[in-house]
Amino acid sequence: METHFTQQQLLDKDNKSSEKILRKCVHCGFCNATCPTYLLLGDELDGPRGRIYLIKDMLENNKPANDKIVKHIDRCLSCYSCMTTCPSGVNYMHLIDHGRSHIEKTYKRPFPDRFIRNFLSVALSNSFNFRLIGYLAQFIKPIRIFFPKKIREMLELMPTYFPKKKLPKKNIYTPQNRKKPVARVALLTGCVQKVISPQINEATIRLLNRHGVEVVIPKKINCCGSLNHHLGKQDLSNETFKKNILIWYDEYLKNGLDAIISNTSGCGTTIKDYAFLFRSDKELKKKAKKISELTKDISEYLDEKVKLDFIKNDKSKKKYRIAYHSACSMQHGQKVHSKPINLIKKTGNEVVEIPEGHLCCGSAGTYNLLQNDIAKNLLNNKIKNIEKINPQFISTGNIGCISQIARGTKIPILHTVEIIDWYTGGPKPEVLRKI
Ligand code: SF4
Ligand code: SF4
């Protein structure tokens, strides 16, 4: 695609990288065929190609965002299905991130919109705030009919139940079964995940410890920063990114880290992108690159680095038909697809892939809170496709998808790591999630 940035505009690092991305696009439109919002709404501007044109126009002409641009960019799930389809290697992720931060800088949203986005930024990126608001929401729920539609929908989506933690709170979990750990990793426990599903982190720690891996959870790391990043709140997300990079890098230098483990694929995608985000930062460039290199989804780490001790011929363990839901951030963001499937297959269970599995379930970070109608439609489609294959369980590697899918079906849903833990000697997971 031809671009018309001036030399002056290209001095800006974000314009420079967006120009490179735009030049790769040959406007073939193949990406539209796998874009959930284009398929649902049928409008060119609700597909990747249309959004690319909108972003190009804003950036090249140094144009402030307007209502129309914001509407179509806000409807993008950041599912990156278009990136998997694109034959020209267009990095839509970096382009839409730039577009969102340009919107945040140049467009004044209506007050209710601003209020909700600021509220989500404060409520969800901090586990203490999220728990507090979750408890408050339970009191407000019975009188929700008095609130505007958007707030009512958000209240509906708030968790009604916070499972109790079973593992004692520590910063270092050392394997008890051997003198010296075989490896040492840092675990990102996630801001929302540790509140609504602490059992996922507990399964991860138990599983790694049982296989001789020491797990470190640095005290001051809470959120990966992706929530604010996707809301276009660049200053806030950069603060979080910087803090995380410095803490993990310090741990890596002082005590050694073989990997940084993410068991929430949405977070993993962002941490793996820290290297790009700090590509021009003299102080943090090298450190951010190291942090991104060290980051692995738990399924990648288990597959590549751990000799898993599956319990063989255990007659007491029933075998199930499990539908694997490949989270968008996992399959399109991190390009990790077959590893979790192969790991579940090693447990002896049957794994079935969901028809139209490349399409988003509608969770997408804060998307189901901000774009409730589209998210509901995508969830309905996902559930129909899951029910077609008649599974006894669903498994996935992202807490956002777990909570979203659990709202649409009674079929139990487990994080992939809970299944692996269970079939390598861990306890049977609490299967029916009350979210
Ligand atoms: S598939 Fe790729 S090259 Fe074709 S329009 Fe979409 S982004 Fe551009
Ligand atoms: S990220 Fe997803 S929703 Fe957004 S344009 Fe690409 S395919 Fe469509």
Image: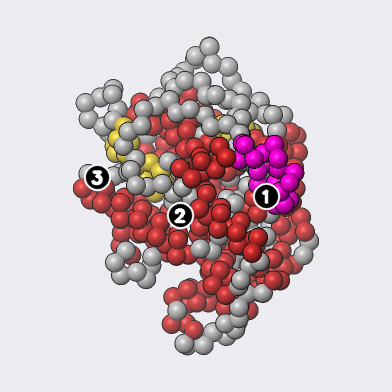
Position above or below: 47 against 168: below
Q: Is residue 340 visible?
A: no
Image quarter of residue 109: bottom right
What is the CA distance from the residue labelled 3 to the residue labelled 2? 24 Å
SS for callout 1: helix
Of circles 1 and 2, which is in front? 1
Residues 112 and 5: in front is: 112
Residue in front for this viewpoint, 422 or 281: 281
Q: Which mark is residue 151?
A: 1
The image quarter in which residue 128 lies: top left
**Colour option used:** secondary structure
Under mark 2, the amino acid is Gly
Residue at image point 69% right, 66% down:
71
Residue 217 position, x and y percent, is 34, 40
Q: Is residue 75 left or right of residue 220?
A: right
Residue 231 appears in the figure:
yes
- Residue furthest to the bottom in view is 7
Q: Residues within 10 Å of mark 3 (few under 14, many from 20)?
A: some
Asked if marks 1 and 2 touch (Cβ < 8 Å), the reply is: no
